[in-house]
Image: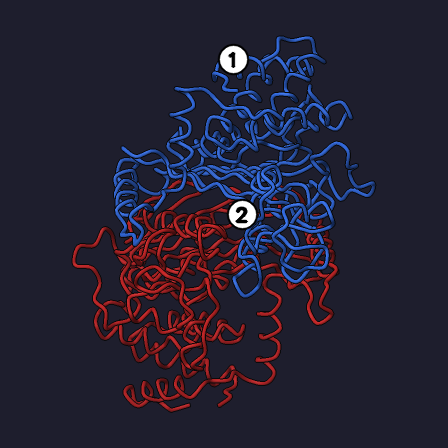
Chain colours: A red, B blue
Amino acid sequence: MVVSESSLRSFTQNIFLAMGCSEEHAALAADVLLQADLRGIDSHGVARLVGYVRLWKKSRINSKPNITIVHETPTTATVDGDAGLGLVVAPFAMKLAIQKADQYGSGWVSVRNSNHFGIAGYHALMAVEKDMIGFAMTNASPLVAPTFSNERLLGTNPMCYAFPAGKYPPVVVDMATSAAANGKLEIAQRKGIHVPEGWIQDANGNFTTDPHALKNGGSLLPLGGDWEHGSHKGFGLSATVDILSAVLSGANYGPWVPPFVAFLEPSDDPVGLGIGHFVGAMRVDGFRPVEEFKTHMDNWIHRFKSASTTDPDQKVIIPGEPELEAEAERKENGIPIVDAVLVDLNGLAERFGIEKL
Amino acid sequence: MVVSESSLRSFTQNIFLAMGCSEEHAALAADVLLQADLRGIDSHGVARLVGYVRLWKKSRINSKPNITIVHETPTTATVDGDAGLGLVVAPFAMKLAIQKADQYGSGWVSVRNSNHFGIAGYHALMAVEKDMIGFAMTNASPLVAPTFSNERLLGTNPMCYAFPAGKYPPVVVDMATSAAANGKLEIAQRKGIHVPEGWIQDANGNFTTDPHALKNGGSLLPLGGDWEHGSHKGFGLSATVDILSAVLSGANYGPWVPPFVAFLEPSDDPVGLGIGHFVGAMRVDGFRPVEEFKTHMDNWIHRFKSASTTDPDQKVIIPGEPELEAEAERKENGIPIVDAVLVDLNGLAERFGIEKL
């Protein structure tokens, strides 16, 4: 089924309103999810709505959070999300970072007591709109094993760096620090196909191509796959995300991060509050005039787009480009919703007594 | 041959003095190189000394730079290295970042017109000493091809994140954003052994295990190896380093980055000045009290060190741990210098009329 952006947006907004979110929060949370769906990152869009509702039902998401700044300097802050939706907590933090950058050149906010924040790119792009460089990262439910271990201690912990350009669209590096995002695994599970070696290991720490291995005690591997191919680097990046998001803010880290799925209980011995994010903004003109920077960004993009390839069907893909193409196409033609997600969404509609899709 | 830290330090310092560096710069540059050798990162220590001298002979390194701040806000700055050694330019930039962080919570400095800065970890650790989180990255000579290309457009572009801990040593994530650092390839070349698939490709863009492929038009691959294993993420990280270090500062980026080896000429159509770095510092107590942070860092490290493993001979390695072990051992027992490097170093001693090793 294909749904128009506006229908899906008002549907999503109505679900958040039914959960008790304010008008402002419902609109914002819907905007974050819709941007994921528009940009083709289906695993992080409305497909997650049922997950948020389940966590809310278990009182693990607070739909009426009192988001506060608990610690601050001119350019740094720690925000407590009051167990709210990450979809509204992270934009609060990013606005604060942008405000600090506006005044002092840069702003950095670590966030505790939050929940899943959607796509990192949404938050980083808030800075880009102001001619700033945007940073956004978050820790997540433990699914990834560090190099040489068979224990799930880290999330797919994405990091995002977003840069404004001139005539070209922004460069947006938005990536899980695992070899593959969990969404890709779910697709393979649904299709019943094998995954490449180097994505996952079984419970004994051996490479496997079985996408169901995760359910049987297996784990995702850090970017790089194994040590020989640099998985200690993927582990190091994931550790960086975990420390900046949670050790710095006072959120849970490592294996203590509360699971996204409501049927798994959070640790009864937490080391912090909720999950953690880290966002930042730096004014481009804190370094050089904006127009100069943008001219060189365009030159950078142009040069990489014209890189030679050996396969005539392939070209160098600028980070952020595929998402932008998806957005243009889906704004025009609507957003495809797979059957399983449609069933979930209409189930929510029924429960809350709102109009189905 | 094994040389004591103090002999190697004064030898190195004498070489820099002979190049015309000030006492202060010679001592600092030697300190950066020695830290690489002590920490076991032999490819970035005194082995590079002959390379620096060759660039200086060709007037591509200025031994008496007038390093200046060319653009500034309270928490950001752009520094022009005046074609000086990156070994002295990057510490200048980091000191400035630390000073800004001291006053405003965080400080960020982009650097143009510089040269190879040694190990990123040295600079990031300057912040850690002040109970700050340190960031350091640099672009480098083009050797790495973006995903789907067979053209060398990026350097091994390392990024480093360094975090203070309590009873444990700092966590230092210091990594090339390519699948393998060039140094590892050089070792394989010397030993005449093959390298794993996923490190390099030949001139036609096919995986090869021949470590000499780089000389024949091949290229290093981004972290991940190929697209299926996330090389677009390695490319994205490398792009991030390139943009923050050079597009932001006004240095050369991408294929325009001047080569480290003196026998290759820099582009006659540069897009900026020299190579670029990006460094930053954030005060831990800009987010939460230092002791709280350190207690949780210790807990984080302890938990990851105790992670289960399936191979009893392996354990999870905390980023920075192997380097620290090397440092303790080499401070005690001296620094091993391979024959080829010893010949180079004593050649320099002869040329400059200083005492040989």
Q: CA distance from mark 1 to mark 2?
A: 44 Å
**Chain at numbered mark 1:** B
For the C terminus of chain B, give its image quadrant.
top right
How many marks are shown on the rendered structure? 2
Q: Which residue is mark 1?
A: B7
Residue that label 2 marks:
A282
The answer to whether A297 appears left or right of A266 in the picture is right
Left or right of A306 in this view: A201? left
Q: State the mark number for residue B122.
A: none
Q: Residue at x 63, y 24 (%)?
A: B49
Q: Which secondary structure, mark 1? A: helix
Q: B135 left or right of B204?
A: left
Inspect the image, locate mark 2, and give the three-letter code of the amino acid beneath it: Met
Q: Position of residue B277 (x, y in %)?
A: 60, 38
- Please determine whether, in this image, residue A49 is positioned above or below residue B302: below
Farthest front residue in view: B192
Q: Position of residue A23 (x, y in %)?
A: 37, 74
**Residue depicted at x 69% and y 16%:** B19
| Secondary element at image label 2 | strand
Question: Dot 1: few (<14), some (14–19), or many (≥20) neighbours within 10 Å?
Answer: few
Q: Residues within 10 Å of mark 2 (few under 14, many from 20)?
A: many
Going by the numbered disc 1, the residue's amino acid type is Ser
> Residue B55 location in percent, x, y?
73, 27
